[in-house]
Amino acid sequence: MTASRRTLKVGVVQQQGWPDKDTSLAASEAAIRRLAADGAELVMLQELHASHYFCQTEDTEIFDLAEPLEGPTTQRLAGLAAELGLVIVGSIFERRAAGVYHNTAVVLDKAAGLVGT
């Protein structure tokens, strides 16, 4: 028996990040849309793509960027995955509980939304 082969087209986004989430997420979305138009089925975003990369120092003012796991960034990316028919691996600065923060990877499926962290 001959095994069938399937090719998975993967796109990777490396972008500038801004302190303003809307600006950073707009850049992420534009890149995802370009990759989808080129046939990508899986898009992988850089670590903490929704803002500037702030992990070099601990600054409590930055904690305002944190959000719940299924917060606005995850919802926006899940909507894009569904709209464009692809899988997105993104990253959020997660506020799990008061004083508990994580740099969390999220896996968003075109049909099921958030399927992994």
Image (cartoon, rainbow, N blue to C red):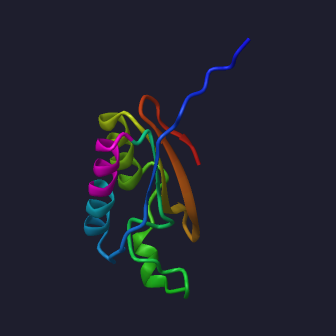
Q: Is residue 78 above or below residue 66?
A: above
The residue nearer to you, when weighing 6 against 49, is 6
Occupied quadrant, residue 20: bottom left
The residue nearer to you, when weighing 11 against 56, is 11
Task: Give the residue furthest to the front.
Answer: 2
In magenta segment, residue 32: yes
The residue nearer to you, when weighing 49 against 34, is 34
Task: Give the residue furthest to the right.
Answer: 1
Q: Position of residue 30 (x, y in %)?
A: 26, 56
- Tell me what residue is drawn at x 40 percent, y 71 percent: 65
- Tell me what residue is drawn at x 60 percent, y 26 percent: 5
In magenta segment, residue 44: no
- Tell me what residue is drawn at x 25 percent, y 68 percent: 23
Q: Is residue 64 above or below residue 41?
A: below
Q: Position of residue 111 (x, y in %)?
A: 43, 28
Occupied quadrant, residue 19: bottom left
Q: Position of residue 60 (x, y in %)?
A: 49, 83
- Tell me what residue is drawn at x 37 percent, y 69 percent: 15
Quadrant where the N terminus is found in the figure: top right
Q: Is residue 62 above or below residue 74?
A: below
- Magenta stretch, main secondary structure, is helix
Total marks shown come to 0
Q: Position of residue 31 (x, y in %)?
A: 31, 56
Q: Is residue 72 left or right of residue 90?
A: left
In magenta, the rendered stretch is 30-39
Q: Is residue 31 left or right of residue 111?
A: left
Q: Is residue 4 left or right of residue 11?
A: right
Q: Is residue 50 above or below residue 17?
A: above
The residue nearer to you, when weighing 75 against 9, is 9
